[in-house]
Amino acid sequence: MAFSKVLIANRGEIAVRVIRTAKAMGYRTVAVFSDADAKSLHVQLADEAVHIGPARVSDSYLRIEAIIEACRKSGADAVHPGYGFLSENEAFARACADNGITFIGPTPKAIELMGSKRLSKIAMIEAGVPCVPGYEGADQSDASFVEHARRIGFPVMVKASAGGGGRGMRLVAHETELVAALATARSEAQNAFGSGELILEKAVIAPRHVEIQVFGDTHGNCVYLGERDCSIQRRHQKVVEEAPCPVMTPELRRKMGEAAVAAAKSVAYVGAGTVEFLLDAQGHFYFLEMNTRLQVEHPVTELVTGQDLVEWQLRVANGEHLPLAQDEIELTGAAIEVRLYAEDPGHQFLPQTGPVLRWHPAKLPGVRIDHGMVGGGEVSPHYDPMVAKVIAYGRTRTDAARLLARALEDTVLLGVNSNKQFLINLLRTPQFIAGDTSTAFIDQYFSADPSLQPATADAESLAIATALILHRRHGTGFHTGLAGATPVKLMLGEKLFSLAAHLKGDALTVLQGDTHSQLTVLKADEHALHYEWAGVRRRCACAWHGDTLHLDRANGNLMLTDITHAPAVTADAEGDGLLRAPMDGAIVTLLVKEGDSVQKGQTLAVMEAMKIEHQLKANRDGRVASVSVSEKQQVKKRQQLLLVQD
């Protein structure tokens, strides 16, 4: 059925991405938004926008009736689901069809089958697609899982049957760990996908994660558009995605592509889909799952094929034939994508929330940055912490990796910490450049990288901060010279830096104990400091938030608070017994009550933030003296939750 107005049932960068192609093809566009997204970029870019509810996804973006009502209000006759949220929800696809709305995606039947890892694996076995040995039975009892895990042999992988993104997934090395892993995986899967159904698979150790992009139309045509290597992962979530796979051969590509097409044809697949495989060192591949939607990493396929996959989706949904036949699809060059997250790699990648003080994506030839950010916006605790996708294209894989690292360096995100330096360092790792990637890459080659340590302030960073503080204090008097030493006290987390600054003209000397450093100020304003350090002229982007100065430095967004004139404060003592929220989020479970005896390292509560569960542990032995929160309560970062005393 022909359509003319497309509603995008999603948010952030994918909504922006779909809106741009739809507009370029002449379609009118409609955005939907929650309370938290009223000023978001996707709302600004769409021709029309409809409010669909509060910030919580269950009250807005996951409400099928709200999306259908938004179509009715706006007159949208087609829906693009993006990825996540309702993109792989067969009930949503059916609701669209029942209301005369074109769903830009596969049939409800295909979504339902492939959306279940258990059922899809059964279907793939019947279709002759190679599969990992495992258990995908209907008996979901712990006893049944233990029995089948013994049959399969440890290590095994526990996986949520519904959904993806690494949620509800646990690697179990020993039988003694299985029951606890099942309970955690069920809980996480139920919260994330509304289904606690699980499967077991034999753990294939250190494989490559290779996925094939497939496309089908309503005329029975189905093709594959090459592969993507998504092997480098953390907590089963993709970190780096690239096309083509570094070890792919034409023969292996043909075999995997034909297997993927066979998988798609077995369910009469229509639209964009991805068939994911595990590829071992011997060249054997095994079906992992099929994602019945556009993937986060689709831009790398677009860059090496020269095709717009959203355009393909819109054409197929309108009843057109696929734009190209299999023998017309060519791969040229190499593309690599990384996901820029608001998270702190130096503290176990804790998600970060807060205001976006500065956002300047790099602008370089061959670089594409997909994002939904606006200056003055906010990273909300209610949604995934991915801020942007940064993608680079080059003639060779080495060219793409070099350009991508440079693009990350040129991208400025201040206000919340990010994994920016982690990604830069990873892209420059010799093993990555050599193409020696697998799902074990980070553990094997990257576990000791400096970006994984808490941020520190070196002498240069302290001098930069001092110069900017003096500029802020004295404004136009900055260059007139200050009599005597000016005290400066800075806090970085719980660490105090006591400095003394001597400024004469543009020459700044900073004393820290018995050491001193020198910096020449070339230009200073509220956005950056231009300076000379050790004979080299440089620039450092900055932003202020109250008395906290954010610097764009190596190992992330360095946050230094000026406490020179603040009342004396004491930092939290190690093992003080206070359990605080490490980020904004919601308390899922309280495992103790007042009066309970606890030991250091014992899990006291579980909280959920940005779709991930976090275990909060005691920092000392003692008894629970007080509990300040309740289950399902929303909490703020650093809020006191419990107190443990002698």
Image (cartoon, helix red, strand yellow):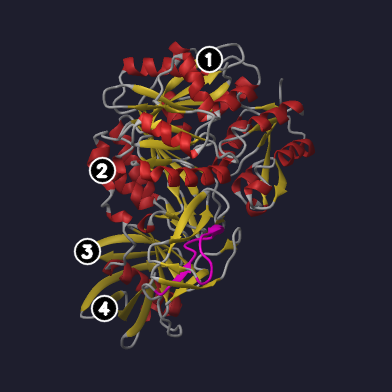
Disc 4: CA contacts within 10 A as few (<14), some (14-19) or many (>=20): some
Pick the quarter of the image with the N terminus.
Answer: top right
x and y, in percent, of residue 391 in the image: 42, 38
* Mark 2 / mark 3, whichever is N-terminal: 2
In the rendered structure, the answer to whether residue 352 lies left or right of residue 449 reads: right
Q: Residue at x 24, y 73 (%)?
A: 517
Q: Disc 4 or disc 2, which is closer to the eye?
A: 2
- The magenta span reads 576-595
* Mark 4 / mark 3, whichever is N-terminal: 4
How far apart marks 2 and 1 lie (CA) works out to 38 Å
Disc 1: CA contacts within 10 A as few (<14), some (14-19) or many (>=20): some
Q: Is mark 4 on a helix, strand or loop?
A: strand
Can residue 213 be seen from the camera position used here?
yes
x and y, in percent, of residue 270 in the image: 58, 20
Disc 3: CA contacts within 10 A as few (<14), some (14-19) or many (>=20): few
For badge 2, the amino acid type reads: Gln
* Mark 1 / mark 3, whichever is N-terminal: 1
Q: How many labels does the image show?
A: 4
- Examine the image and state in which quarter residue 635 appears: bottom right
For badge 3, the amino acid type reads: Gly
Q: Disc 2 or disc 3, which is closer to the eye?
A: 2
Q: What element carries label 1?
A: helix
Q: What element carries label 2?
A: helix
Identify residue for label 4.
512
Q: Disc 4 or disc 3, which is closer to the eye?
A: 4
Identify residue for label 2.
444
**Disc 4 vs disc 3: Cβ atoms closer than 8 Å?**
no
* Mark 2 / mark 1, whichever is N-terminal: 1
In the rendered structure, the answer to whether residue 374 lies left or right of residue 208 reads: right
